[in-house]
Amino acid sequence: MRIEEDIKLDFKDVLIRPKRSTLRSRKDVDITRDYVFKWSKRSYHGVPIIAANMDGVGTFSMAKAFLEHDAKMSVALHKHYPLEDLIAFFNENDAQSAWYSIGMVTADQEKLDAFMQKCPNKVEKICLDVANGYSEHFVDFVKGTREKYPDLTIMAGNVVTGEMVEELILAGVDVVKVGIGPGSVCTTRKMTGVGYPQLSAIIECADAAHGLGGLICADGGCTVPGDLAKAFGAGADFIMLGGMLAGHDQSEMNIIEADGEKFVTFYGMSSDTAMTKHKGGVAEYRASEGKTVKIPYRGDISGTLQDVLGGVRSACTYVGAKRLKELSKRTTFIRVTQQINNVFGAS
């Protein structure tokens, strides 16, 4: 057993210090990014915000809404859509708007193989999603996927430490997902005691990834637009959002009415609700690591998109970043919480 006593920070622990700026208006800020992915060699242009591959967030409706509103954002589609529905969606829509998501179970792999046979060249980006990206089996799975599909852009995770980011990039990952337990409906930290403060995870993992020509996606922990600004300022290349995009018309969930109010059910993908819906229940060898909540119905996604994108633009104006790319170079964080110097309570 050992204890690390270095300061580790979450979004709530810091603010961004304002700096002189020559920008006259938020509309002068360009929040798109351009990347060439390390392994697939594909080019990317867009707003690097991704709707999470969760029920109620990573939906066909969400992807279509992003296209309709010209948000230039993308969606990691949840992995429970039937093959026929996925084929129809990708045949009818721009592949730039969506990531095809899979886990490591055989059924997911077989569905992807069948999709690629029936719809070659329709998918450009895939998301390999597991709760624990530290297993040797996962690294081998990444290597096998890269070997089988050398031209696909691969996003994979989740991890929170630099050495594992490096291993995944060297195994063939273009974008490493960073975050264990920060999500609003994730209970991994409570159930297992495992996790890492998200801001520090982003800083450390971005440094590791960029040194190898890879990228990271900050996954989880953002609850307000200012958190996205902090994540981009810390070095995140992409940000994945769950709860901030939940509860809208595009959730493809039933609206519940109670006491004159409207609600939508939102749950983690490791929750009892999700596992009962998709797998018939929680396996006897594990526990639920997610919760189910009712959140207010929020109507169309357009208002939320304006808040999210407007908040990031505004943050850029406060530090003089004309382009999103410049935000991390212009960011100085100010600590606003006190460190507890002795965890054992000694004076």
Image (cartoon, grey):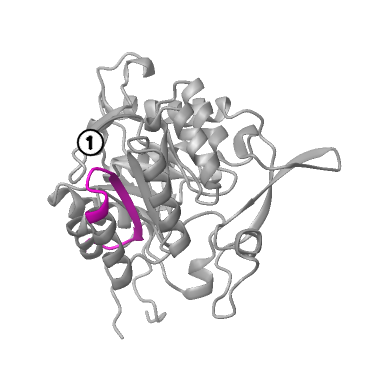
In which image quadrant can residue 194 be found? Answer: bottom left
The reply to whether residue 11 is in sight is no
Give above or below for 242 relative to 338: above
Which quarter of the image is occupied by the C terminus?
A: bottom left
Q: Which residue is drawn at 38% across and 51% down?
A: 113
Residue at the far right in the pictured view: 259
Q: Residue at x 32, y 13 (%)?
A: 24
Q: Is residue 196 left or right of residue 183?
A: left
- The spot of residue 234 in percent (x, y) is 28, 45
Q: Is residue 232 left or right of residue 295?
A: left
In which image quadrant can residue 196 be found? Answer: bottom left
Residue situated in front as seen by the camera: 5 or 72: 72
Q: Give the range drawn in magenta.
A: 147-162
Q: Circle 1 — which element?
A: loop
Q: Which residue is drawn at 17% across and 58% down?
A: 170
- The spot of residue 315 in percent (x, y) is 37, 30
Give above or below for 55 relative to 19: below
Q: In this view, does 137 lie to the left or right of 131?
A: left
Residue situated in front as seen by the camera: 312 or 162: 162
Q: Residue at x 54, y 42 (%)?
A: 84
Residue 254 inside the magenta-drawn segment: no
In which image quadrant can residue 251 be found? Answer: top right
Residue at the far top in the pictured view: 24
Give the labeled residue for mark 1.
42
The reply to whether residue 124 is in sight is yes
Number of numbered labels in the structure image:
1
Give above or below for 250 relative to 203: above
- The spot of residue 137 in percent (x, y) is 32, 71
Residue at the far bottom in the pictured view: 1
The amino acid type found where label 1 is placed reads Arg
